[in-house]
Every structure is written in C-alpha cells, then in structure tokens.
Image: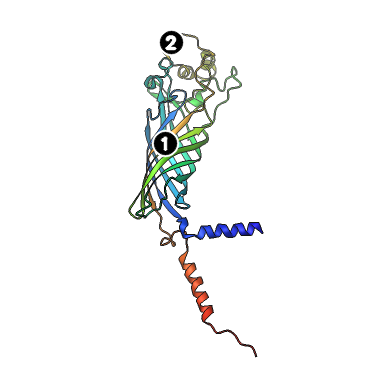
Amino acid sequence: MKGKYLLIVLLLLAASPTRAQQHELGFFAGGSYYIGDINPSMHFAQTQPALGLLYRYNINYRWAIRLHGMYGSLTSSDAKVKYNEARNLSFKSPLLEIGTQIELSYYRFKIGSDKDNFSPYLFAGFSFFKFKPMGELNGEWYNLQALGTEGQGTTAYPDRQPYSLAGLSIPMGMGMKIGLGGSTVLGFEWGLRKTFTDYIDDVSTTYANPTVLASQNTSTAAYLADPSVSQEMEKTGYQRGNSNNNDWYSFAGMTLTFKIKDKSNSCPGVNRSKGNWLKKQWQKMKMEPSPSFL
C-alpha cells in the first residue's frame, strides 16, 4: 500500500508545472590538463585544446542530469614545470571521456525566463576514460605502456604488471550558466577528475634496472625510463614517482546548449493535450442526462 502511495506522489510531482522539465543539447569547447607525478600542483599548466558534446535534462529549476563525451589531450614535462628538472621525464596522451553528472543550481534557473536566467552551479558524477601515454625520442613518439618503463613484463619485476589504459574517474567542479533568449544557454565550468590510476603519465614507483629493461624490453624502454642528464648514476630502486597519490585530470571551458522543443514545450513537464482531453470527457459526462429506469 505504501508503494502505491509513493507511486502516486511521484507521478504527481512529475506532472507538476513547477518542475519545469527541459532538455538541452550542445557542445563544450575549452582545455584539458593533468595533475600528477610530473606536475603535482600547477593547475592549468600546459593546458591542451579540448572539445565535447553534451545533453542536459533539467529535472526542475535547480536540479539537472547531464551526459557528455569529451576529447582532449594531456601533457607535462619536468623541464617546463620545473618540479624535478633533473629527472627530465615528459609525456603526452590523448584523452577520451564519456560520463554523467548531476548539477545543482544555486539559484532557480529556467530556459526562456526573464527572471530566472542566471545561476552558478556545482556538479559531481562518474566517468569512463581512456588514455595512452607517449614518450618522445629522436623525434619519434613511443607507447610507454607497451615499453614497460618501470619493469612491467620483465622477470625481474613479476609484481609489476602492465597497467590498464582505461579507467573510471569522479568528476567534480563548478560553473555558471546564463540564459540567452528563449532557447540558448551559455555556460562556463571547471571540473577536476579524480582517477584510480597513477599511470596517466607512466610514472608511479621506482627506477627499474636499466640492464634488465634493455635486455628484456628494449633499449628505447631503458632510455625513456631515465632520460635524465646524469644517466651514468645508478638509480635502480630510487624513487621515480609517488605511488601513494593517483593522477588527476581536468576539463575547463565554455558550454553552449540549445533547448530541444517537444510536444509539451508550452508548459514543460505537463502534457496539455492529455489534460484537455480529460477535461472534455468530464464536461461531456456532466452534460449527458442521467439514465432512468422503469
């Protein structure tokens, strides 16, 4: 019985005109960057161009659900960030993200409203992402994961297995949106992604033995594992990265979305045609004479 009452309440809420359900479709344009072992704290350092597509479903005036696909790239270099210049590590990686998030507007917001047409918002969600760290040597770029630069795939380091090039992340961030006219929304947002991998940059643990890398992997793997100026110094077992902290990445930029028109566009969240039909049937019943029985 309680379940029946709950269903009735949910249906009433879904049909309520004050819920202002609206759909948007648009795109994202901005940049992407990375935080990790090569760049521990400098936000927006070496930001790369990024693009995306998004769909937003406005549940009511404050809550919305968003689906998106983002594409960008990440890069960082010890020589440019200057956090650990002598180490001289660097990488670049393409980045593809498909995710969903829930957004909470600080003020009431409705597309097409002259009054409720601006609001900051917060968001959080989860995403699936793919990456592929690459290292450069003599003008050529190499797949670092396949090289096993920290000893992955060698008999000397059986506990170090090749890492996955895909994973899950948790987006979180903030933005603001502005209604333009009756169907357009301009937004600006910045979101960080917490990941569960420490290998977006191919750097995590300690230096592997270069002789093992050269003999069981390749000489290219041995060089890209330690491109420092002081390569003559034996670094086997010394810290190369910090495995206690996973990597992060970020998307920041502008969104431009357009309201999708539907049959209930004149009053979002309510199907007026059905309501008018029910009203007519009720009036018809009242006008018909009551049956008489002999």
Which numbered circle lies on residue 136? none
The residue tagged 1 is 251
- Indicate which disc, 1 or 2, sits on the residue closer to the N terminus: 2
**Which numbered circle lies on residue 230?**
2
Q: Position of residue 220 (x, y in %)?
A: 46, 19
Identity of the residue furthest to the right in this view: 1
- Please name whichever residue, 71 or 125, is drawn nearer the observer in this view of the structure: 125
Quadrant for the N terminus, please.
bottom right
Q: How is the image coloured?
A: rainbow
The x and y percentages for residue 15 are 50, 60
Please, what is the three-letter code of the amino acid marked with disc 1?
A: Phe
Query: Residue 51, percent across and down?
Result: 39, 40
Q: Amino acid at mark 2?
A: Ser
User: In this orientation, which residue lies closer to the viewer: 249 or 277?
Assistant: 277
In the image, residue 94 lies at what x, y percent?
43, 33
**Front-most of residues 121 and 50:** 121
